[in-house]
Amino acid sequence: MWRAAEASDDIYGAFVRIALLCGQRRAKVATMRWDDFDGDVWRIRREPREKGAPAALRLPPAAMAIIKQRPHVHGSPYVFTGSHNDAIGGFSARHRAFKARAGVEGFSVHDLRRCSRSLLSRAGVQPHVAERVLGHVVGGVEAVYDQHGYDSEKADALRKLAALIERIVDSEPGKNVVPLRAPAVKP
């Protein structure tokens, strides 16, 4: 899917790659604004109804390269500008077309977020950091006593995620495949 998103060279392909690289919800990525950035730090806007504090993520160079390639559309504050200078929309049609180009079925945009979370674990990121990357609210005693922002830990987690995605995408077919032997039969 990454290769299909990369090859499509359109707004949705870039959107898919950013969603996977940062693990954020569709609406957060879709409404990403140019002025939300301070260098490579994305200050994620929070709606009044949302729980928790507004988040900030230091995006890895791979994500920033994709973002910097996006055109600045005059009159639109959005990185992913859709029609009428609004944020990208029309997800059903865009997603259907993308799945057809990629030759895959049975996945949703939210699956990119789940995949990011699973890859964070695979990359060795501790669960409490991975959950904070995704913006999940930490509850209980931990929420009361642990007031650390985890900014550097989240940045490191996203670098690890990007590096793992790069290794997966750039690996030679069969290179990382280990043949399995049948278990020995006990007499």
Image (cartoon, rainbow, N blue to C red):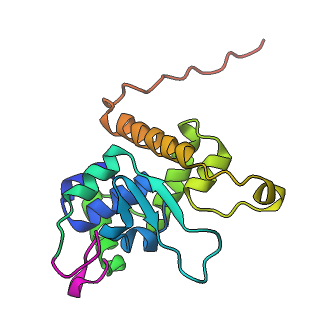
Residue 47 appears anywhere in the view: yes
Q: Is residue 184 above or below residue 165?
A: above
Q: Quadrant of residue 89?
A: bottom left
Q: Quadrant of residue 171?
A: top left
- Identify which residue, 143 or 65, lies in the foreground: 143
Name the spot of residue 53 as percent of width and height, x first.
61, 68
Does the magenta-highlighted stretch encompass residue 128?
Answer: no
- As drawn, which residue projects farthest toward the right? 141
Name the spot of residue 137 as percent of width and height, x first.
67, 64
- As drawn, which residue projects farthest toward the top? 187
**Which stretch appears magenta?**
74-87
Locate the C terminus and report the quarter of the image it occupies: top right
Residue at left offset 58%, top offset 83% = 48
Residue 184 appears left or right of 77: right
Residue at left offset 40%, top offset 43% = 162
Q: How many marks?
A: 0
Prevalent SS, magenta region: loop
Name the spot of residue 164 as percent of width and height, x first.
43, 37
Residue at left offset 49%, top offset 61% = 111
- Identify which residue, 183 or 85, lies in the foreground: 85
Name the spot of residue 119 as percent of width and height, x first.
52, 44
- Identify which residue, 115 or 39, lies in the foreground: 39
